[in-house]
Amino acid sequence: MARELGEAETTVRFRATRLQKSGVVSVTAFADPERLGYGVLASLFIRTSAPRRQAVIDELASWREVMYVSSCAGRADLMIQVVCRSLAELNDVLAVRVGELEGVLEVEALLELKVHKAHYEFDPQENG
């Protein structure tokens, strides 16, 4: 990285450490779910009752299949991303487990057929 930026390695290391400690940057590795045997990716859009929303969030966030949970504005209250080994496993998550959660009113599934881009890079020049 230092070579690419034309900076000293110690300078880059210091700045990267400072950004990590301040919470601006975190280093994350993304595994390819398909190569690990998880060939089924889906996004679930969930409507919940307001009083049970946090309990639903807490429960979903604890499931091993759930990779991402967010609160939304619009037709869904929550969006979750799940990875499963098979359509049968997805059916179990969707029809049985999510459907049985107290406070879940409606679930819509969007099955991902192919990921065309999964790249998270932000241009610091756009921020000010």
Image: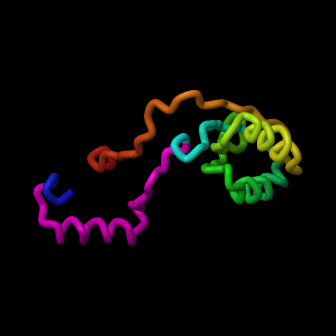
Q: Quadrant of residue 83?
A: top right
Q: How many marks?
A: 0
Q: Quadrant of residue 10?
A: bottom left
Q: Is residue 10 magenta?
A: yes
From the viewer's perspective, is residue 117 above or below residue 56? above
- Residue 82 at x, y = what percent? 65, 44
Say which of 43 and 54 sits in front: 43
Left/right of residue 70 with respect to residue 6 in the rendered view: right
Say which of 6 and 92 sits in front: 92
Q: Residue at x 85, y 49 (%)?
A: 101
Say which of 48 and 40 sits in front: 40
From the viewer's perspective, is residue 104 above or below residue 62? above
- Residue 61 at x, y = what percent? 69, 56
- Residue 112 at x, y = what percent? 60, 31
- Residue 106 at x, y = what percent? 82, 36
* Residue range (magenta): 6-33
Q: Residue at x 88, y 46 (%)?
A: 100
Say which of 80 and 87 sits in front: 87
